[in-house]
Amino acid sequence: MSLTGLNRQQNASARHYLKQSISETAIQAALAMTAGYFDFPMVQLNVVDANFQHTIGSVGTALGTIRREDSLCDQVVREGKPQMLDDFRIIPKAACHIQSYIGVPITGREGLVIGALCLLDTVPRAFSQTQLHQLESVATVIQDQLELLRRLGAVTTGSAAEATELSRGIQLGQLTPLYQPIVDLKTGVVQSVEALARWDHPTRGMLPPSSFVPLAEDSEIIIEVDVAILAKAAVDVARWQRDIPGLRLNANLSARHFDHPDCVRRLSGAVLKAGLSPEFVTLEVTETAALAAHPADRSFLTDLRVRGFRVVLDDFGTGFSAIEQVLRLPVDGIKLDRAVTAALGSKVGDAVVRALVGLAADLRLQTVIEGVERPAQAARAIELGCTHGQGYLWAKPLNAQAMTAHLSPSRRSTS
Ligand code: C2E
Ligand code: CA
Ligand code: CA
């Protein structure tokens, strides 16, 4: 993309704000307060550079990067003024379940708009001028905080010491997977297990991914996390396959792998070493990560599939990406995010699921619906054409021993 002088300056200014991480800072706390104050389920702080929108802080949505043309904040940044959208006009551009968007500009040190603070909801919402002014005031506070961080040059996701501790923990085998079943919705039979990383920390106990995955994703350490979890999980699944031939493994893959073509070799090496064939392994890449990758880097997905892996798009429906582009990616399936599942039962929620499942089926993509907690959601998902489900309704993430019991013949359906 060729940039005009002003756009080039805006791009350079915006990129200063991508060097720091804001998780666990006052900014993240301010975003949470903003969501509560305005009673919106989703808040995002987005930095928009020449080509991408980077969500650097959020409540109720994933962090990540999407193409600028798919960004709802694009117009706020281009025009430098607030935008309120509260009807279906935004749907072709945004994730189809977003129906309210209120965005206000965020200005950087150079005096140029570098991004936006926005509120999102899945239902149409009224928003008064007074509330808009209040949101603009919040944006100025967040602006000051960002400026402070930039001045400090702070990287606050974790200190170098924490990163070193995590690396050492990985070497010492402290990372371990929990497993959550993915079932055939109609029969309840377990088809696959998703490996979810935990850090069995020597003094702090069993830590969830939220306390170390963001730190790991700041660097190449995430690759070591993914490989360590895949390697351990492959051993367990190879063992379970003795009783349940065909049982599959789902594992999460960070976007960082895209930059390292030798990762494909490492990933398949880890699986084969455990005596498992990659054909039984599904790798989950988030929709936003897959789309943010440069088209040339997407051959990574094809390489994985050539090795026998299946690839699915995780957290589907949260990325605000253009559906048609996402569905062109070389993948085998989609996992509907639990935010989509939560909307089941409402007119719009059902329509979204029906449309996504229909599109996926036409393209011969498999659909897993995630975060299913209630029987009524499972029943509705079946009616709407989903074939596979995952969620607390069937099981919370279990350790290997508990999963062995869960998979034992006495519990397995014979259908
Ligand atoms: P994810 O891949 O979307 O995994 C699903 C998350 O939703 C898990 O959280 C799971 O415990 C939770 N969950 C499952 N069913 C339900 C439900 O019915 N209701 C609710 N409320 N939650 C449900 P968990 O284990 O905390 O993992 C969080 C995220 O951390 C994962 O989200 C994934 O993005 C990331 N992650 C986990 N393990 C790895 C890994 O090995 N590598 C990478 N790169 N990321 C990982
Ligand atoms: Ca996943
Ligand atoms: Ca997911």
Image (cartoon, rainbow, N blue to C red):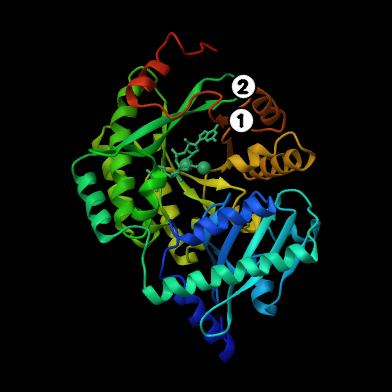
Q: Secondary structure at mark 2?
A: loop
Mark 1 to mark 2: distance in Å?
A: 7 Å
Q: Where does the image place residue 300, in percent across and percent down from the top left?
A: 41, 56
In front of the other: 52 or 87: 87
* For the residues bearing labels 1 and 2, Cβ distance under 8 angstroms: yes
Q: Is mark 1 within 8 Å of ligand 3?
A: no
Q: Is residue 64 visible?
A: no
* Residue at figure coordinates x 43%, y 30% from the top left: 397
Q: Amino acid at mark 1?
A: Thr
Q: Is mark 2 within 8 Å of ligand 1?
A: no
Q: Where does the image place residue 198, in percent across and percent down from the top left?
A: 34, 38
Q: Earlier in the sequence, mark 1 or mark 2?
A: 2
Question: Vertically, is 264 above or below 11?
Answer: above
In front of the other: 193 or 278: 193
Question: Vertically, is 152 above or below 223?
Answer: below
* Residue at figure coordinates x 34%, y 35% from the top left: 177
Quick check: 24 left or right of 204?
A: right
Q: Secondary structure at mark 1?
A: loop
Q: Amino acid at mark 2?
A: Lys
Quadrant including the N terminus? bottom right
Circle 1: is it few (<14), some (14-19), or many (20+) Cα within 10 Å? some
* Residue at figure coordinates x 55%, y 59% from the top left: 30
Q: Which residue is mark 1?
A: 387
Quick check: 208 left or right of 372?
A: left
Q: Would you identify the image quadrant in which residue 49 lies?
A: bottom right
| Label of residue 186 in the image | 2
